[in-house]
Image: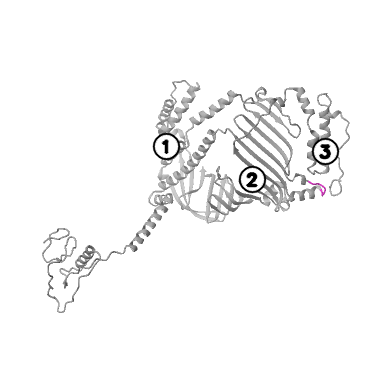
Amino acid sequence: MFCGKCGAKIEDGSLFCPNCGEKLIEATQPVAEEPAIVEEPAVVEEPVVENSESASAEVVEEAVANDVEEVPVNFTQPSFETEKPKKKGKKLWIAIGTSVVAIALVVAIVLNLGSVWGGLVKLFGSDGDYYKYVEKKALKDHAGNISETYGDILVDLGEETTAASIDANVELTVGEGTQSLIKEYLGEDVDISALNGLSIALKSAVNEKAQQVQIGLDSKGNRIITLDMILDLISKDAFVAIPELSSKYLYANMEEQGISMSEEDMEVYKDVIAELEELAPDEETLNSILDRYIEIAIDCIDEDKVEETKEKIAVGDIEKKVTALEFSIDEDYAYDVVKAVLMQLKDDKEVEEIVNNIESYLAKEEMIPSDADLWKELKSGIDEVLDNMDKDDMGKFEIVLTTYVNGSHEVIGRALEVEDQKIISYITLKSGKNFATEIDIADKTVQVKGSGTEKNDVINGKYTIKYMKETCATVELVDFNTDVTEKKPMSGSIEIIPSNTLVEEIAGSGAGVLIKPSVKFSFAKDTVNFEVFNSGSLIVGLKLTATVENGADVTVPDKNNAVDASDSEACTEWIKGLDITGLFDKLDTLNLPDYIKEALDNLEEELLYEQENFGNGSSYSDYDYDYDYSYDYDAAGSVY
């Protein structure tokens, strides 16, 4: 007899196929009831199951488990009911949930791969293995930052701005704090309110033909005086004017004066910049080279010379258990590193390409013979050094480097000792919002501690700076952005509050009681505010605004309407035409104190005399004037 499903040979009278578990009942064959084995046998109807294969298998497994050779069953006529479909909804949700958990687990592992891998190295590797791991990771991170900065410099070097303009303004604010101090020490009659609202405006523009710089003095939005300078980049003519005094420009040729680059010099400069761009390796190449030699230096570490200890370190109010990894840099290690680096350098294709580029440039500039082979000479020199290297020539020395690592396998501090004397060390600890770092240089310590948050490169916090355990200042950061880019300018504010100790150190004993200074920098788009306070009252403020735009329109003055500085007669006429009185009339609108007005009046009189007598040999010193700057003071020191 054979199974109708799998074809396996089975014994006659078998209820199930021993190979696949299929029920062996033929629909056309009448089924006789088997005689009961027990006195009153129970009648068991054939169960209707959803999956005949799984149900049969379960029955077989149960029979084997209970060591039953034959299962007495009283069958009725076979049932031909339609099999019920499975309910897949529950299993589907279980599958989805399992997948989500698995994906989340994979993402967590990927995001924390460094920490996971570091934990495995620490758990299963030696102290030396773990030390190599954390040092490679830390040093390669530093190398990446160096390479990125280097790349930014290359980009800036390669950009040639053909047209751009800058518009900047620095505005002065004299606060009530200054007014109070002035009145207290110089008297009630001394008024410096005229200084309020003074500002210096700077405008600069450049294109491929000309460059212009304007510097102006404004008072509450009104222009007092302007210095306007324009340089013709083609002819090298420089023009200077003070519009409030004269509408005409003075001009002179910079090349004739020997203070300007010639066209040839400018081209040479551009060529040098272009050559530097070609000679310098790109950011990726530099990073690859740095990583390679970091690997070499770390791989030379003798793992048996690394000692791992657990230490409890406290900085400020934070105390943490850290892993301290100590390694001694001695003559053996130095010898091994130098040898390994030189061996790698001989076969370093990226370094070879850089050397060949330098060779091509030097040969083109005829600085070396055209048939020179710098790389071959370099390799020959390396071979000579390797042949003559002797470890005994290096002498005996030992530098002990201790690296402090946190639970995330990150380097959080280092210490350097020479001959059992600590040279420099630093350590940074974090606990929730609290932060503390300490730097020790030759037993002189600087400590910064405080509490704050950092989210998306934005810091909010208040920190104390101490020197030799004495508080120097408090620094408060509000929404301060640390990731400054071209599209993401600096923002937020920094306030620095010197301690009484520091104030008295600078201003003398007792000054800390009278003076409570603070300095605040505020940053926003195109704006920087610098403010100085005393006991919360504004002393002085400077507001800097600046905008940079591409494109610039610079108009070079017509030389026919300008004055040649080398023409003495033309210059004399230009000086005699200056509107000195108009300029001083504008200064009178500043509401200056009387003693300053009197000084300006005397200056105006002097300038007018010099203007009238310019060129005839007479000077104001010959003029009979009658004024003095002597003032009388009352008992309080006020001018009257």
Q: Is residue 468 visible?
A: no
Q: Is residue 188 magenta?
A: yes
The kind of secondary structure element at disc 2 is strand
Q: CA distance from mark 3 to mark 2?
A: 35 Å
Where's residue 569, x and y in %? 77, 22
Q: CA distance from mark 1 to mark 2?
A: 52 Å
Left or right: residue 93 versus residue 268 is left
Where's residue 448, x and y in %? 58, 50
Left or right: residue 560 versus residue 416 is right
Q: Marks 2 and 3: in contact by CB < 8 Å?
A: no
Q: Kindly report the secondary structure that dominates the magenta region of the rendered protein.
A: loop
Q: Quadrant of residue 592?
A: top right
State which quarter of the image contains the N terminus: bottom left
Q: Which residues are magenta?
A: 187-191
Where's residue 29, x and y in %? 12, 67
Left or right: residue 340 versus residue 65 is right
Name the kind of residue labelled 2 in the image. Answer: Val
Q: Quadrant of residue 87?
A: bottom left
Left or right: residue 56 versus residue 498 is left
Name the kind of residue labelled 3 in the image. Answer: Ala
Q: Earlier in the sequence, mark 1 or mark 2?
A: 1
Q: Marks 3 and 1: in contact by CB < 8 Å?
A: no
Name the kind of residue labelled 1 in the image. Answer: Asp
Q: Please give the residue where the numbered disc 2 appears in the rendered image.
A: 528
Q: CA distance from mark 1 to mark 3?
A: 77 Å
Residue 562's place in the image compared with 80, above or below, is: above
Q: Earlier in the sequence, mark 3 or mark 2?
A: 2
Q: Please give the residue where the numbered disc 3 appears in the rendered image.
A: 599
Q: Earlier in the sequence, mark 1 or mark 3?
A: 1
Where's residue 428, x and y in %? 53, 50
Q: Please give the residue where the numbered disc 1 appears in the rendered image.
A: 336
